[in-house]
Every structure is written in C-alpha cells, then in structure tokens.
C-alpha cells in the first residue's frame, strides 16, 4: 500500500468549534462496527487508515453528534470521503451512510466555512448554462490554439477554478457543438450541465440508440440545466432543492425521464426524499437510467453490423449507478446483446472520480484510479464502458479507452462508422 | 460497557501530567521513525480504541508502519519507554484482542498489505500481515489455489489477525484452522529482534515456536510476514440448502451427516431469526418460514462429491427435511454464502449491538445446548440469534441488544457467562476460533486448572518477560499467584 | 455412543462399569486415576524418560545413563465415532489404536514406519507419516494433551472438541519436543473416515508433474528415478485419477518399498528436484520436501534467536533438566 494519506499533517491538539449534527441516534447507532464495508471503501483501500474508512467516519459522526463540537481534523476526515457509497451496498446492517454523510456535509456547509464563498460560486455556475457554455468554448478554443497558458489563466479566474482544474484531464473540449433535435415525446432525455457543455456527442449517441427502438425523444428546454448533484455532495442541499424545482418544471407530463449520467440519475431519483413533496416523489418515480429503460426493450434494437469476433468490453460501474441506483445489471443486459462483456474483479470499487473529488483530493483519487486501471488490465479487455462522464474523464486521463456504453452500441448499430 | 464515545471523552480521566509528558516523549521518538504516521489526535485514538467486540479504551498513540523494519523500530522505541504495544489488523476480532489496555501504542498493520511472493513450486505465498484474507485467495485464483481458512469476515480480516487468533471459518471443517496453513512466520519479538519461526522446509528443526505463536493473540510479538500454504481449488463443488421445521431435527442431521462417514467442506446452521435477517440483506432465497437451515458444501473430485450429495439427501430425509435445494451455479452458491457470511452484521437489523461467544460443544450436544441458549436469553430478556459452524459444533450464539437501554450490559454479560458455563458443562470449550482476548480471559478458569494457566503463562513469559506485548490478554490477571483468578482489570485502567 | 474401551486389560478405564451415566462418570474417574498414577511415577525429582516401543529411542540423542524409565498409560479410552475424536493413553501402540478405530471405519493417519510405535512416541518425535501430503502434519491431528511436567504435575492443553483456540497452544509445542518439556500421559486425537478406495501406482514419470496433475494425492514417494503414488477417496475418483496416471506411464502396484528409517533430511519441496538421479537408497516425499535416508542425518541448526527462545523455554519449564536429559530437539 502506498503511503497515501487522506489528509494533511495534523497535530494532537486542535481547536474545536460547535457543530450540530442532525442525525438521529438510531441511525448513528445502526453501525455495529463489523468492518464488512472496509474493503469496499476506496479511500480505506489506498490509505489503510481507519479515519478514511466508513466505520471510522461513522464513529466520528457519532462522536461529534454526541459532543456537539468538531475540529478541523473532523472536517478533513469527512471531506476525504468520495461519497461513492460502496460501503452502503456492502453493509449487512443496512446503514444509510449516504444520508448520514449528506447531512454531515450540509451541517458543515451551513454552520461553518466548509465551502468557501468562491467555491460555492463555482458550483452555481453549473446551474447557468450560458456561463458554462461560454467558459467551455473559451477552454476548447485555447486548447486548439495551444494556448495552455490561457487555460491555466482561466483556471485561475475564481468561478472557473473547479472547471479549470477539470480541463487538465479533458482530452478535448468542443468549441462548437451542433444542437440536438427532438424527435417525439415518448421519453425525455435529460441533458444536464457539464455533460451537455462538453460531451454532447454522448447525448447524440444515446438519443440514436433510444430512437433505434422506435421511440421518439423529447429534449428539455434550457431551464433544466443542472440536477444539483455536485451541490448535494458539497453540502449545498438548498441549492440542489432550488435546481430540482427548475428541473421538475422543465420536464412536465407522464413520460419517462431517461438519464445517461449516473450521478444525475442518482440525485434525481432522490428528489422525493430531498423535497419531501408528493409532486417530487411522483417526478422521481419517472426517472430511469437510460439502460434500465433500454434493458426492457433490448430485443427491439436492430442487429447492427455483423462482426467476426464480438468486441470484448470491460464494464466499469459508476458508483452512482451500482451502489446508489443499483442499476448496473441493465448496462450488461444492453451490452451483452452485441458484445462480450467482461467483469472487473474489484466488486465495483470506486474509480476515484467522485464528481469534483478528483480535483480536490488528487493524490487519493489518483491512487484509487491506479487500482481501477490495474483491475481493467487484469481483464485483458481493450475497451471500457462507463456510464458516467466524470468516471470517463478521470479514467481517460491515464490512457484507458473509456466510452459511454451507448456510444459503443450506437457505433455498432451504425456499422462501426464514427458518429 | 462504555458508551461508544466515552472511549474518546474519557481518555482524559486519570491521565496525569506525568503521563502526558511520557506520551509526548514517546510520540517524539515514534515520529522519528514514522513521521506523520504516528498519531496522537483524539479522533484517531478513538478510532483505534475498539475492535469487533464490545469493549474499548483508547491507546496513547497510533502507529501506521509500512515495513517490518519500521515495526521493529517501533517495538524498540516502546521498550526504551517501557510502554506496551499492541498489533492490530482490521479490528474485526470478537474477543477484544485488539482492544488497548494500559495506554499502549497501537501498531496497525493495514498499510503492510503486499503479497510479496507466490511460490507455486513450494505451494506457499509470502505475505505481509495486513493483506486481507479474501484478497489473498483472489490473487491465488488464477493459479488454481486459495488460502483455506475463510472466516466469515474474510473480505475484511487480515492474515495477521487470522494468525494471531488461529482463526477458522466454514471451510475449516475439512481443511483445518489457520495453524495448519502457516509454514513460517517472520516475527518481531518483544525484545525488538526479528526472527523467522517455522520454515518452508518439511520439518523445521527444533521446537514448534511457529505453532505456539499462531493463536497467541499478539502476546508474543508482531508477525511482519508469513509463508502461508496454498490449497488447490477443488475441481467439483456442490452447495446444498436444507430446511427444517424443527431446530432439533436440523442439529440431529448435523451429527448424522458426520456419522455417515462424510466430511463436508462446510456444514453451517442458521436458526429462524438468522434466516430472516440474512435474507433481508442478501435476497438469496433463504426460506424465511423455516425453523432452521443447514448450508452444506461438498468439494473435491466429482465422484466423491456426487456420492456425498446423495448421502446428505438421505440423511436429511430421515430427519424430515422440508426442501433440499442444490445451488445451480457459482452465482447461486456465491449468493447463499454472501448471506451466511454477512450474518453478524445483519443482526443490526434487529438491534444495534451484539455480543457473542463462540464455544464449541460435542456435535451430539448441539440440540441440548441450543435449547439452553434460548432459555438463557429469554431469562435475561434478550434476543438470541444462532448462526454457526455446526459441522464442528462451534456455536455462535449472538445476543442482540441496544446498549442505550439502561442496565442491559450487565444482563448481556451475565447471559454470556451462563452460555459459556452451559457449553463447558456439555463437554465443550471456551472458544473455537475467535480467541480469548480480553472478553473471555476471566472464563479461562472454567476450562483450565490454576496450574494449566500458570504453565501457559510461563510459556508466554519466555517470549515477553517484561509483559509489553498486548498485555493482560488471554491469561487472567493473577495467574502467577494462584489465589486471585477472578480479579478484573482495575477500574480506570481502561474504560 | 462410546464404543467399548479396548486394549490393555490392566487399564482401569477398561473395567468401566455398565450404565451410560455411571460409565461416563467412572470412566472419567478411571482415566484421571491413571493419569495421576503416571504423574506419581514421574515424581518431582530425578532424571526420567518415558519408554514406549523403543522404535525411535535414539532420535535427538539417547537419554543419559541412569535416567529412570517410566511407561505412559496405555489403552483406547473413549472413541466417539460421530464426534470423530478418540481419547487414548500416550502409551497405546499405533497398531492397537488403528485396530480399534477400524471397527467403525475410522483412522488416525499417524502412519509410523513401524506401527509397534506408541502414539506418545510418534507425537514426541513429531514425525508425520507418508500420507502427510493429504492429511497434514501429525500435530494437526492432536486436539488435547495431558502431560506431566517437571514438577510432576498434570497439565492439560487444548480441548476435547474438534476445534478449539482456548489458551496457548501447548499441545503443538509438545509435539516434536522429544519429551523434553513434559511427558505425554493422554491425548485426544481427531479421527477421519477410512477412504472407501485406495490405490498405489508406480512408474518412472516426473513426480513433480504428477503432483501438478492430481488433485490432493495422498502420497508421492520418489527415489530419484522411480515414483510411487497413493490415491485415496471415492472409487470413481480414484479410478479416474489413476487412469490419468496410467496415460502418463504409471501402473498399479501393491505399494512402495520399505521406507528407510535411519535419517530424515528436511528441505523445501522444490529443492528435491536437485536429487534427481542421485543414488543412495533414499525415498523422498514429493510435495513435502522430506528425504528418508538409510543413514542418520545431521539435524539442521536453528537460528541463534530461535535457539535462545528454545533454551529459555526448556529452562523455564524444566529448570533441573530432568525430563529426558541427553535429548535435545534443537
Ligand atoms: C462479521 C464477523 C464475522 C467473523 N467471522 C469469523 C469466523 O467465521 N471465524 C473466525 O475465526 N473469526 C471470525 N471473526 C472474528 C475475526 O474476524 C477474526 O478473529 C480475524 O482473524 C481477526 O482479524 P483482524 O485482522 O480483524 O484482527 P484484529 O481484530 O485487528 O486483531 C485480532 C488479534 O490479532 C492480533 N494481531 C493482529 N495482527 C497481528 C500481527 N501482525 N502480529 C501479531 N498479532 C496480531 C491483535 O493484537 C489481536 O489480538 C468474525 C468477525 C466479524 C466481525
Ligand atoms: S457501516 Fe455497516 S458494514 Fe460498515 S462497519 Fe458499520 S455495520 Fe459494518
Ligand atoms: S462513500 Fe465511498 S469513500 Fe465514503 S466512506 Fe463510503 S465507501 Fe468510503
């Protein structure tokens, strides 16, 4: 194990500050400390430290909840969690870790300076498609013109710092993208914020596969830009609620809402819990990962071009698909119709991307990614399917050929021609 | 029993300024060895204050070494400061073996998790102590081998912990417990010297110090590397699930299967409550209405396995089995085992805390002792859940409770003691695989004479004359002066 | 469920009275009485050694002249076929134990070269038999020991059940200690079902390749050019494995030649390869790394750190060096 540390140097005595953690005592007591979650926790895996484990984090939350105070070390321990929720599916006791961590982050964000004002601004930018689009085009242009200095300068402009850092791992940000065109009203395809700005071609591929089943696709108006997922993980739940209301208003009716980004899907399925309204619960009931919807219609897809030997594809499950939505099997159902699907041997351990995590904790995220890359290598497959843009970018940065599962399917249905 | 965070808050109690100065000097020396991998902040000390048992008290300092050389340095620093030290693997021990007593230095091996060498020519692998049990078997799979001891906690427990506790697991019925699978051990002795016990050769010369170290729960030093034996993966495996409407029919079937001359690779039993909670987690199709199920696995060459399946069927029928379900494929087998192996944690679905013993009784006494377990739990107003290694009579009566209920801890402990007494009365022993640690040391006198324990302590002392290695474990305090066996750890020494 | 105690008519345990409860209680009392009597014989002073069948009397040195000889209790005292355990006096011969167990289709694979050896003798030497490849080391067959220590007191270690981790594993320490730390009085061993089929095969093939070819063979013996392999288990499996060997040029046979007993040379299993083609009347256990030689073999030295621990153990457990003086396992 590397000497990776979850957080920086700390000394024994740190000054404390009051913190009210609003997690009820039954929830806090529900962890029996059996440790079964430890090997499924990416940060424990690469550090070997109890403080970077789910069991440790829960014990710390319990301690802070009872004491009513915390210190800087506590904040760092909590911040080092990727929120992949691998611990949750592994936990035999049914501990709802994800909610505990969201509550903790919310408490930190609202009662302390955990999310500095400028970081909050960056998150807000995600909900502003124009600003995001402008920034992205500028980035893409600078990449093309080799103006890396401009890129790094832009990264220094505070609202873009988060995004600027992300571009370091981005292969190529498109300068101009042809808009998507709606083809009917059987289903909504949710297009999101970062993904629409940077990876519209993925949406295009997804749309074409949906249409190949004979369904018509409706597209949301510009108002439904961001699902609020990153905000929720950062403890800015009120921002998420605000965005959720916008999204709900933009996608009316009864039609299923299909999501091709696991992180967005996980958050949108939680709108009911988040807003606590009947309307939100109904809306959440319409949300499906696009693979869930397709898996039920996989026989309606055409054969596609004949191939000599089926392509071997390793499936990397985004945590928000596998651990949160538990919708990882449909991906296999769709892919195995056309390809030879091979499994990684790491029980769906996180890849380290974690939304903005990989920018905030590059060392841990990098070490976690190394484990994933090694698991991919053990499969011998040359193509990796991953249904989440964050994971895709994070893994592409170490030279893996990672694509959205439906991009691979679309290409196949198109006779192998690039989109 | 401490409130879970009392461990943190209470640390200040009874700690004098002299203690604090001693801790500071010790920390400075340990930092010299480990840099920032020696920790003394309250939070982290709290996290290393307990294992899978219900006891807890924080250590003075937590060390996270990365190599055997660092472990040896830590031990030497501790010697210089006359400070006890205590190895810790994944902290899943169920007897308090890894619970700090006497403000020790915790030496966590979790960063030492390299598989150093897989040597198929000698059918061994050299591994560091922090390697997780299941990771090892997975790494061996491509070569057709595995590490046979498979505690239910195998996905998380460390090889070092397995060695220290001489751990077992469902498949130890046929393959034997950890000690049969350890060829050699590199050990940092309490003197600070490093040596290798045992060997890869057929008959290492001299006394079997390796065999003595295995199961000594960290009281004879710290294992820094182990040569573990590789077991061939069986060509054929069959897993059967049998359900019964009567616990006693189930346990009678256990004896009958063994008496029929069969040694299944695993023979596990679960009672009704266990079945329900396990099914709620695993969704493996366990029959939630049944009073008991047996999970039977046979492995080996196909002829013997199929013959065994028939014997199990016949025996089960004689004992009025409800259904005999044979797992159709690896996926179904894995799901059944996933349920079984997560049973302890799943108890939290009933109550947030559990306490269990792991006595072993003769198989023919299973029915009788199980009945007593239920009666004892009832008498103390507790819920008993039974999920255990029936094939070798190794009970795991789990008492589910909520430590926030006032007075519950006394009831739990009293019930535990009664269960141990009932097991020993039936011709059983104190622990089948979890070890004695802190929780069961005061029961040693139920099984061993004063002189037996004295002799054991003399042997321990040979390795650790100064009592620095995980002190106050296994042997009850006062074993060297025969009159004071039931003495407990003094109040305030730990929470 | 105990089968009848057998063996030494002189054994008080054998005279256990009728009626299950009474039998249980008086059996225990009788066994205890025998062990106590043995402890009395050992006493608390003067050099003492246990004599068994004298089949391994010179292992690790011969006891000094003038050492008092005592005999450990003998007799199979309790056998619970459904528990797969057997309790016997350490002085019981392996032949007697085997005969007793065979009646219920069970065995303890001690497999000494000469089955006139006593159970206690085999364990004190710590010599596993030629089927160790399948059944493991003899020390893993031991569940509980009762020994008499240097002070003449009885010490119990381990426990009567098939699985047990209560306390320090003194029973394992005693196995192979040549009676220098304590004298075995009574043991409880794990029994196994006798395999329904067994077949030896022989041939000139590569024993290492044969080992890789087979699933858990019971024994592979090799003299540098010729190989003898024992298969045990279900008849269909033995036949199938045998046919694999036959394809590789092996043929059924009655068994290996007598195993030389004068010396045991211990090495890593892979190091055996270097012996290929060397002569000398030896027979090696492939997969184990043990070479049985017709001449005595110098014991390998132990490391200074381990020697120190062993010396101190001996010093603490037998300060007057009265248990088997002249013998030393290291
Ligand atoms: C859900 C659950 C199921 C379990 N199932 C089983 C089961 O089926 N069978 C079974 O036998 N046990 C079982 N256990 C108990 C436990 O998992 C085992 O005892 C395991 O071997 C402990 O390993 P660990 O790494 O967690 O050790 P720890 O708990 O960290 O330590 C255990 C002991 O080992 C010592 N130790 C650790 N590392 C070293 C080292 N390198 N050198 C010297 N001493 C060391 C410690 O000092 C301590 O005394 C279970 C526990 C849980 C929580
Ligand atoms: S979160 Fe669940 S799996 Fe992890 S230690 Fe707690 S109870 Fe066990
Ligand atoms: S959410 Fe992921 S990173 Fe956080 S504790 Fe759970 S497993 Fe670890």
Image (tube, rainbow, N blue to C red):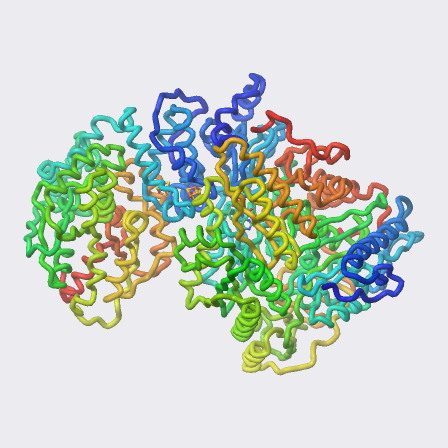
| Residue C209: % across, % down | 55, 72
**Vertical relation: A154 (above or below) C238:** above
User: Looking at the picture, does residue B291 appear above or below residue A126?
Assistant: below
Q: Quadrant of the N terminus of chain B?
A: top right
User: Residue at image x 44%, y 53%?
Assistant: B276
Q: Is any part of residue A341 visible from this angle? A: yes
Q: Is residue A19 above or below residue B262?
A: above
Rendered location of residue C136, percent (x, y): 65, 62
Say whether residue B164 is visible. Answer: no
Quarter of the picture holding the C terminus of chain B: top right
Pick the front one: B398 or C87: B398
Using the image as rendered, state which of residue A15 and residue A272 is in the foreground: A272
Where ligand 2 lies, by quadrant? top left
| Quadrant housing residue B230 | bottom right
Residue C240 at x, y percent in the picture = 55, 79
Q: Quadrant of residue B348?
A: top left
Q: Name, please, the residue furthest toward the top.
A: B17
Please state which of residues B25 and C223 is positioned toward the viewer in this rendering: B25
Left or right: where C290 falls relative to A51: right
Residue extending furthest right? Answer: C66
Question: Residue at image x 86%, y 42%?
Answer: C320
Which residue is at 46% across, 67% downward?
B325
Residue C299, position in %: x, y? 74, 56
Taking the spot 58% from the left edge, 17% from the top edge, the residue there is B18
Image: A146 above or below A386:
above
Q: Quadrant of residue A408?
A: bottom left
């Amino acid at each position: 194990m590397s000497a990776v540390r979850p957080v920086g140097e700390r000394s024994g005595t740190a000054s404390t500050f009051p913190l009210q953690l609003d997690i009820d005592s039954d929830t806090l007591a529900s962890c029996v400390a059996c440790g079964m979650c430890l090997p499924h926790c990416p940060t424990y895996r690469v550090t070997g430290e109890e403080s970077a484990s789910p069991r440790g984090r829960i014990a710390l939350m319990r301690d802070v909840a009872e004491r009513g105070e915390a210190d800087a070390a506590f904040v760092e321990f909590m911040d080092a969690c990727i929120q992949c929720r691998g611990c949750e599916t592994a936990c035999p006791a049914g501990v709802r870790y994800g909610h505990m961590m969201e509550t903790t982050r919310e408490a930190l964000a609202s009662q302390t300076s955990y999310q500095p004002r400028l970081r909050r601004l960056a998150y807000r930018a995600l909900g502003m498609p124009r600003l995001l689009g402008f920034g992205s085009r500028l980035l893409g242009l600078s990449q093309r013109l080799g103006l890396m200095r401009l890129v790094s300068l832009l990264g220094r402009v505070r609202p873009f710092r988060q995004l600027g850092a992300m571009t370091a791992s981005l292969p190529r940000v498109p300068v101009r993208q042809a808009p998507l065109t709606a083809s009917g009203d059987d289903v909504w395809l949710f297009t999101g914020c970062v993904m629409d700005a940077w990876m519209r071609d993925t949406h295009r591929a997804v749309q074409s596969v949906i249409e190949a089943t004979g369904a018509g696709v409706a597209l949301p108006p510009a108002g439904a830009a961001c699902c609020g997922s990153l905000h929720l993980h950062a403890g800015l739940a009120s921002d998420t609620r605000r965005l959720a209301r916008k999204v709900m208003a933009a996608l009316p009716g009864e039609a299923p809402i299909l999501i091709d980004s696991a992180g967005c899907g996980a958050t949108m399925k939680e709108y009911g819990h988040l807003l606590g309204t009947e309307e939100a619960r109904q809306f959440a009931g319409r949300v499906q990962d696009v693979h869930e919807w397709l898996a039920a219609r996989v026989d309606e897809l055409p054969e596609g071009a004949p191939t000599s030997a089926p392509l071997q594809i390793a499936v990397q499950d985004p945590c928000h698909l596998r651990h949160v939505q538990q919708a990882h099997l449909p991906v296999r159902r769709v892919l195995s119709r056309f390809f030879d699907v091979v499994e990684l041997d790491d029980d769906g351990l996180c890849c380290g991307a974690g939304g903005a995590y990989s920018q905030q904790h590059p060392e841990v995220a990098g070490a976690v990614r190394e484990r994933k890359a090694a698991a991919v290598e053990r499969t011998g497959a040359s193509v990796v399917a991953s249904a989440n843009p964050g994971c895709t970018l994070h893994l592409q940065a170490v030279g893996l050929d990672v694509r959205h599962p439906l991009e691979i399917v679309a290409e196949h249905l198109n006779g192998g021609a690039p989109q | 029993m401490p409130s879970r965070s009392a461990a943190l808050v209470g640390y200040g109690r009874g700690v004098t300024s002299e203690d604090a100065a001693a801790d500071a000097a010790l920390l400075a020396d340990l930092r010299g060895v480990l840099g920032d991998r020696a920790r003394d902040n309250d939070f982290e000390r709290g996290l290393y204050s307990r294992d899978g048992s219900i006891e807890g008290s924080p250590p003075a300092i937590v060390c996270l070494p990365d190599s055997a050389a660092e472990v040896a340095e830590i031990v030497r620093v501790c010697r210089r400061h006359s400070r006890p030290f205590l190895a810790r693997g994944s902290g899943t021990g169920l007897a308090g073996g890894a619970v700090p007593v006497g403000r020790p230095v915790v030496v966590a091996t979790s960063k030492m998790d390299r598989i150093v060498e897989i040597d198929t020519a000698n059918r061994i692998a050299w591994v560091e102590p922090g390697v997780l049990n299941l990771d090892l078997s997975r790494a061996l799979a491509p070569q057709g081998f595995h590490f046979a001891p498979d505690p239910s906690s195998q996905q998380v427990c460390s090889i070092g912990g397995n060695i220290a506790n001489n751990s077992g697991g469902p498949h130890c019925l046929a393959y034997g417990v950890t000690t049969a699978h350890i060829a050699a051990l590199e050990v940092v002795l309490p003197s600070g010297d490093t040596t290798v016990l045992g060997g890869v050769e057929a008959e290492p010369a001299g006394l079997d110090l390796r065999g003595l170290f295995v199961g000594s729960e960290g009281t004879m030093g710290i294992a820094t590397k182990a040569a573990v034996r590789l077991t061939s993966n069986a060509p054929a495996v069959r897993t059967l699930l049998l359900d019964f409407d009567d616990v006693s029919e189930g346990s009678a079937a256990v004896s009958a299967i063994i008496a029929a001359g069969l040694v299944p690779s695993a023979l596990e039993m679960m009672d009704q409550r266990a079945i329900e909670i396990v099914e709620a987690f695993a969704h493996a199709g366990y029959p939630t209405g049944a009073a008991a199920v047996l999970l039977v696995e046979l492995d080996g060459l196909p002829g013997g396995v199929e013959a065994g399946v028939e014997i199990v069927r016949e025996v089960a029928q004689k004992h009025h089995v409800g259904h005999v379900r044979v797992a159709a494929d690896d996926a179904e087998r894995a799901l059944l085992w996933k349920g079984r192996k997560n049973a302890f944690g799943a108890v939290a679905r009933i109550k947030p805390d559990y306490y269990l013993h792991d006595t072993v009784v003769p198989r023919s006494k299973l029915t009788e002792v199980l009945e007593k377990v239920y009666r004892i739990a009832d008498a103390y107003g507790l819920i008993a859940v039974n999920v255990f290694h029936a094939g070798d009579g190794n009970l795991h009566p789990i008492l589910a409770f909520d430590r926030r209920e006032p007075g519950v801890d006394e009831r739990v402990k009293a019930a535990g003691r009664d269960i141990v007494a009932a097991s020993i009365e039936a011709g059983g022993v104190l622990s089948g695989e979890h070890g004695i640690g802190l929780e069961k040391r005061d029961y040693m006198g139920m099984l061993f004479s004063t002189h037996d324990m004295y002799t054991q302590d003399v042997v321990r002392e040979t390795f650790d004359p100064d009592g620095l290695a995980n002190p106050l474990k296994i042997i009850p305090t006062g074993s060297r002066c025969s009159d004071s066996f039931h003495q407990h750890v003094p109040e305030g020494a730990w929470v | 469920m105990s089968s009848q105690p057998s063996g030494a008519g002189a054994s008080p345990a054998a005279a256990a009275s009728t009626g299950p409860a009474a039998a249980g209680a008086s059996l225990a009392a009788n066994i205890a009485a025998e062990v106590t009597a043995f402890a009395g014989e050992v006493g608390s002073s003067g050099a003492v050694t246990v004599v068994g069948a004298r089949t391994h009397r010179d292992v690790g040195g011969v006891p000094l002249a003038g050492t008092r000889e005592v005999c450990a209790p003998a007799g199979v005292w309790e056998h619970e076929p459904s528990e797969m355990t057997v309790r016997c006096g350490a002085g019981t011969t392996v032949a007697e134990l085997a005969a007793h167990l065979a009646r219920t289709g069970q065995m303890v694979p001690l497999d000494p070269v000469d089955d006139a050896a006593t159970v206690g003798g085999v364990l004190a030497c710590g010599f596993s038999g030629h089927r160790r490849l399948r059944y493991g080391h003899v020390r893993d067959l031991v569940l509980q020991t009762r020994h008499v220590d240097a002070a003449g007191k009885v010490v119990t270690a381990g426990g009567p059940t098939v699985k047990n981790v209560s306390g320090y594993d003194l029973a394992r320490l005693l196995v192979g200690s040549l009676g220098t730390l304590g004298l075995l009085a009574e043991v409880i061993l794990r029994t196994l079902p006798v395999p329904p089929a067994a077949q030896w095969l022989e041939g000139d093939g590569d024993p290492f390749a044969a080992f890789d070819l087979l699933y858990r063979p019971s024994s592979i013996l090799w003299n540098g050019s010729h190989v003898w392999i024992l298969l045990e288990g279900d008849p269909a499996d033995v036949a199938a494995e045998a046919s694999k060997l036959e394809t590789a040029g092996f043929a059924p046979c009655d068994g290996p030649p007598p195993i030389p007993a004068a010396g045991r040379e211990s090495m890593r299993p892979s190091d055996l390869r270097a012996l290929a083609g060397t002569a000398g009347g030896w027979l090696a256990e492939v997969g184990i790394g043990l070479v049985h030689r017709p001449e005595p073999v110098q014991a390998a030295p132990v490391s200074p750190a381990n020697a120190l621990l062993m010396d101190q153990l001996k010093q603490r457990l037998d300060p007057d060096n009265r248990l088997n003086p002249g013998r030393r396992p290291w």
